Amino acid sequence: MQLTRFTDYALRTLTFLAVQPEDRLSTITEVADTFAISRNHVVKIVHQLGLKGYIETVRGKHGGIRLGRSAVSINLRDVVVDMENILCPAYCKSDNCRLAGGCRVQGILRKAMNAFLDVLGEYTLADAVRDPARLCHLLGLEPDELLAVG
């Protein structure tokens, strides 16, 4: 299973926000620059994350983005399911496959996908940012600005 870049970048955005101080608003430009992602792409990601309640967006001159709820309440399975457009590992019906109706590969792949999602369901964003000092170092952030993740 390979996640789309959209989902990958959504997880990176959430990770970035999770290590920020609770009262700090980050900007889309900061996220884009930190991960060398197109600003326009981050705008789309932030919009989806906002619609799903993972982040809060504040408009205006001093606006920005931050987590919409605690990192411990953001389940990684939920994020992946919400961000991925298609979670079907094979496209048997759309490919007019000659094996359709007799092949068991689709069912096997579906079982593997469910196992993948079940493992993700065991973790939250807080689990992913358990070492905020190291993450801040990797992101080029000052450790004294750390948020006690939770």
Image (cartoon, helix red, strand yellow):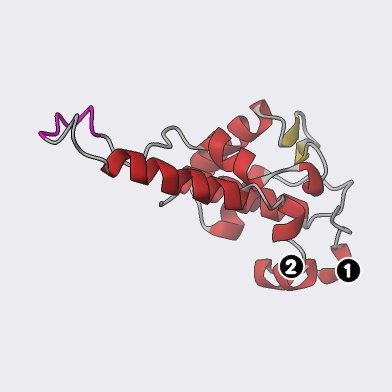
Q: How crowded is mark 2: few (under 14 residues within 10 Å), some or many (20 or more)?
A: some
Nearer the observer, 73 or 19: 73
Q: Check the image and report above or below for 21 versus 75.
A: below
Q: How crowded is mark 1: few (under 14 residues within 10 Å), some or many (20 or more)?
A: few
Task: Assign a secondary structure to mark 1.
Answer: helix
Marker count (numbered): 2
Which residue position holds label 2? Answer: 136
Asked whether the viewer can see residue 25, the reply is yes
| Residue 132 position in % (x across, y down) | 78, 66
In the image, the segment drawn in magenta is 92-98
The residue at the point 79 percent across, 42 percent down is 73
The residue at the point 22 percent across, 28 percent down is 94
| Residue 51 position in % (x across, y down) | 65, 26
Amino acid tagged 2: Cys
Residue 129 located within the stretch drawn in magenta: no
- In the picture, residue 67 is in which quadrant? top right
The residue at the point 40 percent across, 41 percent down is 110
* Apparent side of residue 28 relative to residue 127 in the rendered image (left or right): left
Q: Which mark is residue 144?
A: 1
| Residue 19 position in % (x across, y down) | 78, 58
* Apparent side of residue 40 relative to residue 68 in the rendered image (left or right): left
Asked whether the viewer can see residue 4, the reply is no
Task: Assign a secondary structure to mark 2.
Answer: helix
The residue at the point 64 percent across, 35 percent down is 49
Q: Looking at the image, is mark 2 or mark 1 earlier in the sequence?
A: 2
Cα distance in 3D space between marks 2 and 1: 10 Å
